[in-house]
Amino acid sequence: MRAVLQRVLNASVTVNTQVSSIDRGLCILLGIAFDDTIDDLEYMVKKILKVRVFEDEKGEEMWSRSVKDAGLEILCDKPSFHNAMKANESKEMYSTFLNRLKQEYVEERIKDGVFGEKMIVNIVNDGPVTLELDSRKFIYVDKSISSSKSNNNKEEN
């Protein structure tokens, strides 16, 4: 599971005439891949709520508070992408993701658009601060290490 996290002064999504918006907080573009699991979802919920991208209460020290620490809002959207999970499964996982955010934070501070609909997303990025989060970033295989092991095995034979 991947997410693009943007620190925003404000953000909104519009579907037809329906608008969902936040003031200062985070805008999350969540990518749900075909092989994502509940473990990926739980990792992403915890990471989004704990990542420190906001300044302290005095506005002096950057990177000291999370969205949860600062009591700010979160706007979520789930765009489609090449390796996305099929719509029915993805809709269920996205709904679970939103519910977990609401359970771990404050329900009224979690907003989203309409799943599967074409939306207009307006973002006023603050900083700008944009981070890419990946629930599996620490499990990828380093191909250079794999290649070097393969070459060593060939030399031994």
Image (spheres, grey):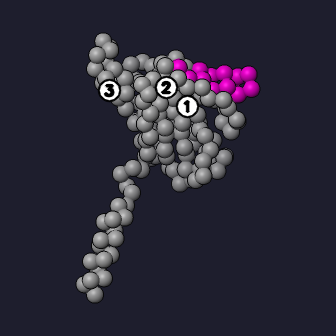
Magenta stretch: dominant secondary structure: strand
The image position of residue 93, as x and y in percent, is 57, 42
The image position of residue 11, as x and y in percent, is 56, 23
Secondary structure of residue under mark 2: strand
Which of 41 and 73 lies nearest the eye of the viewer?
Answer: 73
In the displayed structure, 83 sits above or below 127; it is: below
Segment colored magenta: 10-21
Between discs 2 and 3, the one toward the N terminus = 3
The residue that disc 2 covers is: 125
Which of 3 and 86 lies nearest the eye of the viewer?
Answer: 3
Q: Residues within 10 Å of mark 3 (few under 14, many from 20)?
A: few
The image quadrant where one finds the C terminus is bottom left
- Look at the image and tell me whether residue 92 can be seen: no
The residue that disc 3 covers is: 63
- Residue extending furthest toward the left: 156
Calculate the distance from the C-alpha at mark 1 to the C-alpha at mark 3. 21 Å
Between discs 2 and 1, the one toward the N terminus = 1
Q: Residues within 10 Å of mark 2 (few under 14, many from 20)?
A: some
Secondary structure of residue under mark 1: strand
Q: Quadrant of residue 105?
A: top left
Disc 1 residue type? Answer: Cys
Q: In the drawing, does residue 46 fall left or right of residue 78? A: left
Calculate the distance from the C-alpha at mark 2 to the C-alpha at mark 3. 16 Å
The residue that disc 1 covers is: 76
The image position of residue 51, as x and y in percent, is 37, 32
The label on residue 25 is none
Disc 3 residue type? Answer: Trp
Secondary structure of residue under mark 3: loop
- Residue extending furthest toward the front: 128
Q: Quadrant of residue 42?
A: top left
